[in-house]
Image (tube, rainbow, N blue to C red):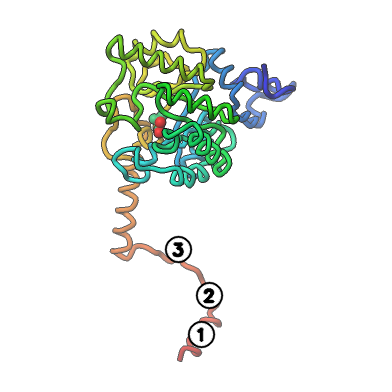
């Protein structure tokens, strides 16, 4: 079921490239990774290979995702809080998302790029949803889009977008765009009835043709119960270890934020601290005359300088 006929590595998404005869494996130049495709993603699930997904919002974060070897990149509407400074995701609009997604596109070659449909860009009708998804693909180069919720309206929007030829990722559990209706930013599915509702939403999205579904802030034991019922890749964020993959927000995992964030975040760096210290050191250097030094300036021929001096009188 390879989407790359003739390429032996394509039948196994992360297959190591065999060393050529007579060449030590450490002398073989690294083979570029294959671009992630929907068949390769499904294959990863079949093989039980964990799927790695991260958000990105600009060229540098996209480059980090590319270099870090992730499989899926989401231009998340979490941009509203991480890079645009809003206190929730609802204010970000489609035009904002398109600017961010275009920058991410310029930084990515390999991961599948998914554009998040922001609040207000798909709720009104299937037609509105298709029009917004088409803009994400046509104007920003997204490979797929994501929408939140698994109720009848979201399932219908997903079906309509997929019918227009655009792959859709679903998102159930804590769906930040409707966090007020859900009672705040808190775990979902903590009663049998609530967990069963999440299961039926996930199944509805799968029935609509979604290629993958995000499970957010769901008890790990609930995820474990649900997983055998879901055929498409499930990507978890605060949903425990039993999903097919994990997603984290770029700014959370790298510590580009105040505070630690939700309990499910594991922090791999403290870039905010580095940024604060770097800017403070620069400010101190400027104020104390330590920057710029001679090595930061440009030179001019002495004769030219003398002539300038004469010209200026
Ligand atoms: O917008 C976002 O970052 C998301 C992820 C948390 C899945 O939807």
| Quarter location, residue 151 | top left
Give coordinates of residue 308: x percent, y percent.
Answer: 51, 85
| Quarter location, residue 185 | top left
For mark 2, give the secondary structure. Answer: loop
Q: Is residue 26 left or right of residue 198?
A: right
How far apart are the two marked residues, 2 and 3, measured between alpha carbons?
Answer: 14 Å
Give coordinates of residue 182: x percent, y percent.
Answer: 28, 25
How far apart are the two marked residues, 2 and 1, measured between alpha carbons?
Answer: 11 Å
Among the two numbered marks 3 and 1 on one chain, the one whose residue lies closer to the N terminus: 3
Mark 1 nearby-residue class (10 Å; few <14, some 14–19, many ≥20):
few
Give coordinates of residue 263: x percent, y percent.
Answer: 29, 25
Q: Is residue 288 above or below residue 207?
A: below
Residue in the image at 59% along x and 24% along y: 38
Mark 3 nearby-residue class (10 Å; few <14, some 14–19, many ≥20):
few
For mark 1, give the secondary structure. Answer: helix
Is residue 67 at all visible to an observer of this figure?
no
For mark 3, give the secondary structure. Answer: helix
Q: Label 2: which residue?
A: 300
């Amino acid at each position: 079921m390879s989407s790359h006929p003739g390429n032996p590595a394509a039948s196994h998404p992360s297959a190591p490239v065999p060393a050529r005869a007579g060449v030590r494996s450490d002398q073989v130049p690294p083979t570029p990774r294959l671009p992630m495709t929907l068949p390769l993603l499904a294959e990863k699930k079949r093989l039980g290979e964990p799927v790695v997904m991260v958000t990105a919002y600009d060229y540098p974060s996209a480059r980090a995702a590319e270099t870090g070897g992730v499989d899926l990149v989401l231009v998340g509407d979490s941009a509203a809080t991480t890079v645009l400074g809003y206190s929730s995701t609802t204010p970000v609009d489609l035009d904002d998302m398109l600017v961010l997604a275009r920058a991410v596109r310029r930084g990515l070659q390999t991961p599948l790029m998914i554009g998040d449909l922001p609040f207000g860009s798909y709720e009104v009708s299937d037609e509105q949803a298709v029009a917004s998804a088409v803009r994400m693909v046509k104007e920003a180069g997204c490979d797929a889009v994501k929408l939140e919720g698994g109720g009848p309206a979201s399932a219908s929007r997903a079906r309509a977008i997929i019918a227009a030829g655009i792959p859709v990722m679903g998102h159930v559990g804590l769906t930040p765009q409707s966090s007020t209706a859900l009672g705040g930013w808190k775990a979902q599915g903590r009663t049998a009835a609530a967990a069963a509702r999440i299961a039926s939403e996930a199944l509805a999205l799968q029935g609509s043709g979604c290629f993958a579904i995000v499970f957010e802030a769901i008890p790990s034991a609930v995820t474990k119960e649900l997983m055998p019922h879901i055929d498409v890749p499930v990507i978890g964020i605060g949903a425990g270890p039993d999903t097919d993959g994990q997603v984290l927000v770029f700014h959370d995992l790298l510590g580009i934020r105040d505070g630690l964030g939700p309990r499910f975040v594991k922090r791999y760096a403290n870039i905010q601290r580095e940024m604060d210290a770097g800017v403070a050191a620069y400010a101190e250097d400027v104020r104390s005359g330590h920057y710029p030094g001679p090595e930061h300036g440009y030179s001019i021929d002495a004769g030219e300088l003398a002539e300038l001096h004469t010209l200026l009188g």
